[in-house]
Image (tube, rainbow, N blue to C red):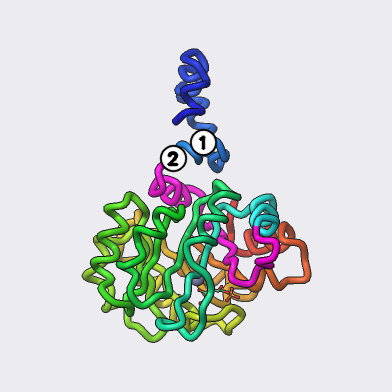
């Protein structure tokens, strides 16, 4: 990476000393270090800082997108969640590649892009080009296996989502292709819906059965009243929309309280 090259040999040697590396490992990656990391590494870094709260931009003020992104970043968000809906897979339409690219320009945080679209394999490359780091497709969509293979081939982290009504058994064959599983705790399509605890049972099973490498995400209705149950069930990535963007409190205050309830460091 250019930045590291510019540091010069002496400083690079210093950076490579175990004590300093250890300190860096304990802290979230700085924006300049993140710029040097691959998409997959940016996402896998989240595992070391789990549980991580990911603000879902679905309910943010899109008229001030850059300001919103900076605000949640300054408030302590470790990654951002972006909901792409096509009006076919779900009864709602949101946004596509240009918004992902705009957020990419505004932030070095890992971008977790949740595709609620019918035919993700046709768009994997476009979302990778737009700047997604983690791309999640639904098992209920067309050809999830092909879509996951394309995501992996592009060097991104691959996520597989399942709706509340979909049994865990339906994703088992695909797990070797996944870096992350997203258990939906609401039917996908809209923010601010009530939390469905069926997602917790799925996460508990995955946590107990799978190797610790798999990231476990929960999305929908995660708020101060539900977040502790999510982490207790093994969630390592917590998507939060309305409890940040529609809360009366400033973003930093909401995030701090949610982090505390989630048991995050
Ligand atoms: C729902 C989306 C969620 C949504 C969560 O289909 O996938 O990411 O923004 O919003 P809340 O936290 O309000 O349920
Ligand atoms: Zn989502």
Residue 253 in the image, given as x and y percentages of width and height: 74, 60
Which residue is located at x 65 percent, y 73 percent? 242
Q: Relative to the observer, which residue lies in front, 192 or 256?
A: 192
Residue 72, relative to residue 13: is it above or below? below
Residue 207 in sight here: no
Q: Which residue is mark 2?
A: 37
Q: Which residue is mark 1?
A: 33
Q: Secondary structure at mark 1?
A: helix
Crowding at dot 2, Cα within 10 Å, few <14 / some 14-19 / many 20+, comes out as: some
Which residue is located at x 29 percent, y 65 percent? 147
Residue 57, relative to residue 6: is it above or below? below
Residue 165, relative to residue 248: is it above or below? below
Residue 185 in the image, given as x and y percentages of width and height: 49, 78
Q: Relative to the observer, which residue lies in front, 99 or 18?
A: 99
Residue 69 in sight here: yes
Residue 262 in the image, given as x and y percentages of width and height: 59, 63
Which quarter of the figure is the N terminus placed in? top left
Snapshot quadrant of residue 177: bottom left
Which residues lie in the magenta part? 37-65
Which residue is located at x 44 percent, y 51 percent? 43
Q: Relative to the observer, which residue lies in front, 264 or 128?
A: 128
Crowding at dot 1, Cα within 10 Å, few <14 / some 14-19 / many 20+, comes out as: some
Mark 2–mark 1 contact, CB under 8 Å? Answer: yes
């Amino acid at each position: 990476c250019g930045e590291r090259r510019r540091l010069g040999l002496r400083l690079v040697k210093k950076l490579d000393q175990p004590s300093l590396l250890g300190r860096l490992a304990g802290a979230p990656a700085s924006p300049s270090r993140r710029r040097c990391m691959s998409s997959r590494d940016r996402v896998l870094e989240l595992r070391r800082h789990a549980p991580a709260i990911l603000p879902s931009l679905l309910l943010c003020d899109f008229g001030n997108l850059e300001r919103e992104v900076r605000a949640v970043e300054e408030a302590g968000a470790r990654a951002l969640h972006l909901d792409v809906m096509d009006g076919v897979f779900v009864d709602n339409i949101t946004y596509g590649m240009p918004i992902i690219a705009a957020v990419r320009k505004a932030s070095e945080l890992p971008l977790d892009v949740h595709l609620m679209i019918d035919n993700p394999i046709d768009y994997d490359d476009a979302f990778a080009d737009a700047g997604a780091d983690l791309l999640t497709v639904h098992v209920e969509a067309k050809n999830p296996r092909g879509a996951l293979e394309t995501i992996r081939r592009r060097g991104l982290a691959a996520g597989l989502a399942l709706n509340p009504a979909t049994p865990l058994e339906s994703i088992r064959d695909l797990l070797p292709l996944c870096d992350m599983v997203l258990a939906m705790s609401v039917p996908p399509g809209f923010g601010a819906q009530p939390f469905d605890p069926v997602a917790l049972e799925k996460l508990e099973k995955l946590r107990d059965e799978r190797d610790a490498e798999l990231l476990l995400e929960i999305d929908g209705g995660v708020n101060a009243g539900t977040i502790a149950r999510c982490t207790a069930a093994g969630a390592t990535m917590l998507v939060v929309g309305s409890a940040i963007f529609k809360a009366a409190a400033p973003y930093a205050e909401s995030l701090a309280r949610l982090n505390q309830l989630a048991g995050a460091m």
